[in-house]
Image: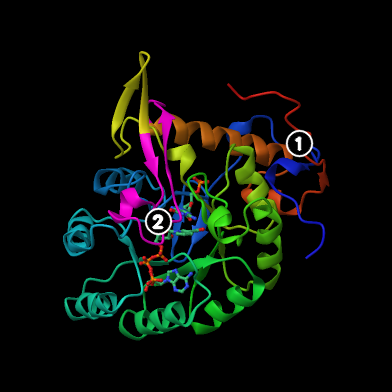
Amino acid sequence: MENVFDYEDIQLVPAKCVVNSRSECDTKVTLGKHTFKLPVVPANMQTIIDEKIAIYLAENNYFYIMHRFNPEKRISFIQDMRSRGLISSISVGVKEEEYRFIEQLAAEKLLPEYITIDIAHGHSNAVIEMIKHIKKHLPNSFVIAGNVGTPEAVRELEHAGADATKVGIGPGKVCITKIKTGFGTGGWQLAALRWCAKAASKPIIADGGIRTHGDIAKSIRFGATMVMIGSLFAGHEESPGETVEKDGRLFKEYFGSASEFQKGEKKNVEGKKMYVEYKGALQDTLTEMEQDLQSSISYAGGKELDAIRHVDYVVVKNSIFNGDKVY
Ligand SMILES: NC(=O)C1=CN([C@@H]2O[C@H](COP(=O)(O)OP(=O)(O)OC[C@H]3O[C@@H](n4cnc5c(N)ncnc54)[C@H](OP(=O)(O)O)[C@@H]3O)[C@@H](O)[C@H]2O)C=CC1
Ligand SMILES: Nc1nc2c(ncn2[C@@H]2O[C@H](COP(=O)(O)O)[C@@H](O)[C@H]2O)c(=O)[nH]1
């Protein structure tokens, strides 16, 4: 791999505007059989999403993926979503009990629309076997498999039956995989996304490393259909993490799914905890993301997300912020 770069090293080049107002630009995206308001999904982590947020997102036509860290609640979660007429989108791991869980869903005719196989090193036989198992028992569920960081992995998981792959090993804000193992796409996630997208024949979800709303547009330019985001969704009123007060300011916890706080033990720890300043209502962030993305589409010279995929870009190594901050 040559010419690696990350989000902060890239600027997209504006094209002639074809709208009179940014409100004319449409941020909708289709994944599988459903169309969603934004090409963005909050990370399937315990301090980012819970059942209440999942219901809110589904009711308001945003994509969501429920985490897998309360495995005993998944059946009732699917039943509840179904009784409300909402999409079910859950996560699974690859251990033996997860095979029985998939069989139980099939036996009870509980058919989630989306199932995400969520493990750290997704380029593995464990994931390939789980994709096949899900496709055998729940052939109509849309399977997202990850995480991976190479074209070989994308091709192998697609070949095994995955409907989408999730790209990103170690670029996350609470991730320490890159430090503890020396491996990953941290620092070159955007280039890894481009590399993987060139090999993909199905949608890619870019996962981790998004620090600004402009990074969503950049992900789409480099091949993502959808973008998974943790830290920007942490710290909201609705966020499940603990709230703490420090020097009169409110913060909420955000911890890694492979941290000791998630695992309850210090074994194979590859994640940490941080505190994120309280951000207010989740909907305000979603609305701002939509507006910023509408603006991105207008700069791309189009009316729909697809326009972003065709713009030129320049590499401006580490210089776009010039010391500026958004807030
Ligand atoms: N996107 C990212 O960069 C990363 C994300 N995470 C997140 O942390 C959570 C926990 O992940 P994970 O530890 O995979 O989940 P699990 O603890 O459920 O592990 C899944 C299975 O994969 C095995 N496994 C895990 N890592 C490796 C590896 N490097 N090589 C071989 N086998 C492995 C585990 O066995 P054993 O534990 O015995 O090895 C276990 O059998 C997930 O939500 C994941 O998304 C974690 C790290 C990186
Ligand atoms: N290496 C680790 N990665 C993790 C862990 N928990 C979650 N994640 C990944 O991070 C993204 C979110 O990234 P962000 O930059 O938007 O905050 C998430 O979707 C996972 O892929 C972990 O413990 N270790």
Mark 1: few, some, or many residues within 10 Å (few <14, many ≥20)?
some
Please tell me whether residue 261 belongs to the stretch shown in magenta: yes
Give the mark nearest the N terminus, 2 or 1.
1
Tell me the number on the disc at residue 258.
2
Q: Split into 4 quadrants, where in the image is the C terminus?
A: top right
Q: Which residue is mark 1?
A: 17
Q: x%, y% of residue 117?
A: 40, 69
User: What residue type is disc 1 on?
Assistant: Cys
**Magenta segment boundaries in residue numbering:** 253-281
In whole angstroms, how far apart are the C-alphas of marks 2 and 1?
Answer: 44 Å
Is 280 left, or right, of 230 in this rendering? left
Q: x%, y% of residue 37?
A: 47, 46
Whether ligand 2 has any atom under 8 Å from the Cβ at mark 2 is answered as: yes
**Which of the 4 quarters of the picture holds residue 300?**
top right
Is 147 left, or right, of 262 in this rendering? right
User: What residue type is disc 2 on?
Assistant: Ala
Give SS at disc 1: loop
Vertical placement of residue 125 versus 14, above or below: below
* Foreground of the two, 140 or 89: 89
**Which of the 4 quarters of the picture holds residue 130?**
bottom left
* Foreground of the two, 323 or 221: 323
Whether residue 294 is visible here, answered yes or no, is yes
